[in-house]
Amino acid sequence: MSGTRYLLAKYLTSTWFLIIVIMKNLQDILKEIDQLRPEELELILKRINDRINRKRKLENAFEEYIGAAKGFWEMDAQEYINDSRTEDDNKKEVA
């Protein structure tokens, strides 16, 4: 087996092992949940809902600013960076 194939096989094996461990942990958690009393389930549900709401608010906050600076620069941001780097390189050559 070539070195690349060996590394790929090792990576895939470790990845599958990790997936299996995660799935086992998830199954263990679900089994534990099945053992909980209704008031404990309500507490977990509340915490999950709170976490989902926080994540949604954060995502919405970022989405609000997407494209906010559009038209601010006279050129594409990557083009601006490339031009700035070229200018810096030219200054270094002159110095």
Image: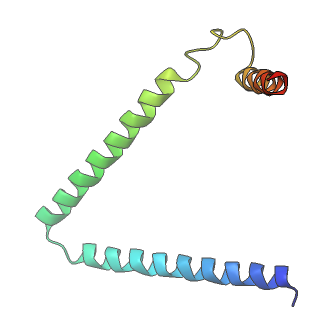
Asked if residue 67 is positioned above or below residue 21 in the image, the reply reads: above
Instruction: Please identify the residue farthest to the right as the structure is shown.
Output: 2
Which residue appears at 53% of the width and 81% of the height?
20
Task: State how the image is colored.
Answer: rainbow
Q: Position of residue 22 (x, y in %)?
A: 47, 75
Which residue appears at 23% of the width and 53% of the height?
47
Which residue appears at 32% of the width and 41% of the height?
53
Picture quadrant where residue 95 is located: top right
Picture quadrant where residue 75 is located: top right
Asked if residue 50 is positioned above or below residue 8 in the image, the reply reads: above
Number of labels in the image equals 0
Instruction: Please identify the residue farthest to the left as the structure is shown.
Output: 39
Q: Position of residue 43 (x, y in %)?
A: 17, 58
Q: Position of residue 73 (x, y in %)?
A: 67, 11
The residue nearer to you, when weighing 89 against 19, is: 89
Asked if residue 18 is positioned above or below residue 81 in the image, the reply reads: below
Residue 42 horizontal side relative to residue 12, left or right = left
